[in-house]
Image (tube, grey):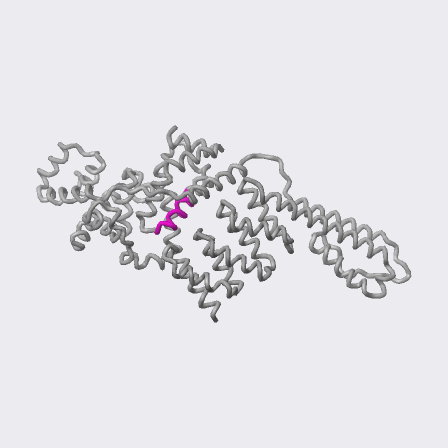
Amino acid sequence: MTDEQAMMAVAGGDLDKAAVLYERYKRPVLGYFCRSSVNRDSSEDLMQQVFYRIIHYRKSFAENYVFRPWLFRIARNVLQDFLQKNRYMFSGLDTEIEDESSAYDGEQEYQLKRALEKLPPEYKEVILLSRYEELKYDEIAEILQISVSLVKVRVHRGLKILREIYFQME
Amino acid sequence: MKNVEEIFADYLEGKLSEKELLSFFSENPEAQQEFEELKQLFNELPEAVQPEVSGEANDHFYAFLEGEKSKATPRFRVSFGEILRYAAMILAVAGAYYFGSRKPEKEIVTIEKPIYITLRDTVRVKEEAEGHGQGKAARKQPAVMEELANIRKEVGEINEVQHKMILAMLRQESAASRLEAINYSYNLDAADGALMDALFQTLEKDPSVNVRLAALDAVGRFELSPAMRENLVLTLAEQRDPSLQMALITKLIELREVKALPVFAGIINNPDVSENIRDRAEFGIKVLNM
């Protein structure tokens, strides 16, 4: 059963299929929030909110929709709401990254992760969505409500800025 | 003609052929070095780590899903609140009919307040009449007093039924039913010991965080004895769910419960507790020490 078939079933009232989608996507969605600099506890709360919204708004899922970008659009909205409500917590983010170097293979990988954290949000967002959530540029454009060309520009510039930050850290 | 951004983005997405790439570099040789560097950087980005989801989060989701499923199941149902409203209306109309149909005797008893159609006001009319019962007029109206005593008895019975229904619903498997039970409790002016025990037990042990939060809200609406307040403090000490921790701290600050101070201090010193909760506990200590 594809994601879209499962979601159409949920939209049609077969809520058991929501469990199928939850099991497929709970970890990618949790990873999305963790990578977006939200702490672990809050990330789990936000992940749950995403699935609550999917169930609440199930009838808005149309037959021609692709599930994955639709899911991440909801996840992004949840993230934006959270950041809006917790602005004060994120103002000094770049200096408060937890020391989790042991979770990475090597120093270089860890430094790259730290560099990613320091990337301006609009660039970081497109890189995360394309590199980690494996979304296509047209899907990212739809999620962010911007043009595909702008997504491409942001990927390119984002990597250039990332390279500068990375070299500065070295 | 594509610019460097498009060429790079298309390459990453696998939409660019080798031929197109070579053609671009032959016309823009200065772009090749940067292209190679960015490509290398992109490939060296850390692999996606997919964190494990906690068992607690899974439990919350499945409890929520069960609740949604039971809500989505079509069934004939009369709201308990509606039943109560109708019962109160019947009582009030019966009372109004009784008083309206009585012929005035030599000494007229005036019930100054009108008969209302809600349960709460029916009780108030009864209480006011009982107040008159201390006086001369009511002593001469034993039938009125008898009728009011009947109304009081019936209201008591309705309350008892309401308590029993809420208790039964709190034992339901569906989180939605338990939430509904808690919502009904909001209509009560007071909760008996059994209901308060059940609400506290729900607050401490219900598998759904939403239900536990609602139980806290319900508990907070009733007058809390010192033992119940202490129970709230103990619940906070045992609690690991961040949203409940936050709600409990807020409630204890609102109650100005100084016995919560040591638990607040423990939270502040616990590095496993999230920062915003520790901040709230710190705020609580300041408020309670004022």
Callout count = 0
Q: In percent of the image, x 24 and y 50: which residue is there? A: A101
Q: Taking A21 as reference, is B231 left or right?
A: right
In x, y percent, where is residue B175?
A: 53, 42
- Across and down, in percent, residue A170 comes to 16, 54
Is B128 displayed left or right of B194 in the figure?
Answer: right
Where does the magenta region start and end?
A: A39-50
Residue at the bottom extreme, as displayed: B290
Residue B114 is inside the magenta segment: no
Q: Residue at x 17, y 41 (%)?
A: B39
Q: Is residue A88 above or below residue B66?
A: below
Decide: is A66 above or below B243.
above
Q: Position of residue A165 (x, y in %)?
A: 19, 53
| Residue at position x 42%, y 36% in the image | A61
Q: What secondary structure characterizes most of the magenta part?
A: helix
Would you say A75 lies left or right of B208 here? Answer: left
Residue sitting at the far right:
B106
Horizontal relation, residue A18 to residue B13: left or right: right
- Foreground of the two, B193 or B279: B193
Q: Position of residue A86 (x, y in %)?
A: 38, 56
Q: Residue furthest top?
A: A1
Quick one: B262 or B172, which is closer to the camera?
A: B262
Question: Foreground: B118 or A113?
Answer: A113
> Which image quarter is the N terminus of chain B in?
top left
Determine which quarter of the picture holds residue B8: top left
Instruction: Tell me the quarter of the picture where residue A50 sits.
Output: top left
- Give the residue at x 54% y 60%: B230
Foreground: A56 or B283? B283
